[in-house]
């Protein structure tokens, strides 16, 4: 089954404690993105990748890092999380010309 | 820069009735895609319908149809015969064909739709 898998689905943590949200897709897609969803703002792109070792900032990249060492994986790293990064996060992938496939989301709470 | 605006934060409709959700967008491009996504309480992002800007014919998927007005930059979603399972947040989204920023989607603020029995 074609899917984008994110883990964890929920995480409560404290300010400053490094965390990683994993994302994996099994469709051999070139393009992968991370979005955050906040009330009244919709979803906004954090980072994206157009292929292995090719990543770039989206619209709201501050406080986040990503890597793309393998085509299927695109982890989101928060080196020193802060409360303003409390949000719902989505990983997405797509092939050239194809629709976006979304993961099921990660609810992140930073105290 | 492209923007997408949904001016109705919340809407409600009686079961079996028809409801229309509004969306306007701004872009200087002539070729692009527009989408409506449904987000139920499970938080999944589910693609409802897609419209290619170069197609004049409005897209339809079962009970869901759009009214695409390219000159007015308007893209509304009509849900016919509303069902309780249609209760969800609905997002309008835009993407350019230039694959700027990895083909990112630009989302509206969302409209929370409640279908009442």
Image: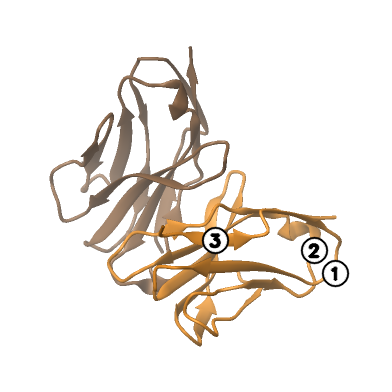
Chain colours: A orange, B brown
Upstream in sequence: badge 2 or badge 1? 1
**Residue picked out by circle 2:** A82
Q: Say which chain tag 1 marks.
A: A
Q: Where is residue A38 in the image (x, y as percent from the top left)?
A: 62, 50
Q: Which residue is drawn at 52% across and 57% down?
A: A103
**Residue picked out by circle 1:** A16
Q: Say which chain tag 2 marks.
A: A
Dots 3, 1 in contact, CB < 8 A: no
Answer yes or no: are tags 3 and 1 on the same subunit.
Answer: yes
- Residue A22 against residue B83 in the figure, above or below: below
**Residue picked out by circle 3:** A5
Q: Residue at x 47, y 79 (%)?
A: A71
Q: Which residue is drawn at 26% across and 64% down?
A: B29
Q: Nearer the viewer, mark 2 or mark 3?
A: 3
Mark 3 surroundings within 10 Å by alpha-carbon count, few (fewer than 14), some (14 through 19), many (20 or more) = many
Q: Say which chain tag 3 marks.
A: A
Q: Where is residue B41 in the image (x, y as percent from the top left)?
A: 57, 36
Q: To which quarter of the image does residue B48 belong?
A: top left
Q: Residue at x 30, y 42 (%)?
A: B75
Query: What whole-number distance in Å separates the C-alpha atoms at marks 2 and 3?
Result: 25 Å
- Residue A86 against residue A68 in the figure, above or below: above
> Image quadrant for the N terminus of chain B?
bottom left
Q: Can residue A108 be seen in this view?
A: no
Which residue sits furthest bottom? A53
For residue B92, the mark is none
Q: What element carries label 2?
A: loop
- Residue A18 against residue A36 in the figure, above or below: below
Dots 2, 1 in contact, CB < 8 A: yes
Q: What element carries label 3?
A: strand
């Amino acid at each position: 089954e074609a899917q984008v898998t994110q883990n964890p689905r929920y995480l409560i943590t404290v300010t400053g404690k490094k965390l990683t949200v994993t994302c994996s897709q099994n469709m051999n897609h070139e393009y992968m993105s991370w979005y955050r969803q906040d009330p009244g703002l919709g979803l906004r792109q954090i980072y994206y990748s157009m292929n292995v070792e090719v990543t770039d900032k989206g619209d709201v990249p501050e406080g986040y890092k990503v890597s793309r060492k393998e085509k299927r994986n695109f982890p989101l790293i928060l080196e020193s999380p802060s409360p303003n990064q409390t949000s719902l996060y989505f990983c997405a992938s797509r092939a050239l010309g194809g629709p976006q496939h979304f993961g099921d989301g990660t609810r992140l709470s930073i105290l | 820069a492209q923007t997408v605006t949904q001016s109705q934060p919340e809407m409600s409709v009686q079961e079996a009735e028809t409801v229309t959700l509004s969306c306007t967008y701004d872009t200087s491009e002539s070729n692009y895609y527009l989408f409506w996504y449904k987000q139920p309480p499970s938080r999944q992002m589910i693609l409802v319908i897609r419209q290619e800007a170069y197609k004049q014919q409005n897209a339809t998927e079962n009970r869901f149809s759009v009214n695409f007005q390219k000159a007015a930059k308007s893209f509304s979603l009509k849900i016919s015969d509303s069902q309780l399972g249609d209760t969800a947040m609905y997002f309008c989204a835009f993407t350019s064909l230039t694959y700027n920023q990895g083909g990112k989607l630009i989302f509206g603020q969302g409209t929370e739709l409640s279908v009442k029995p």
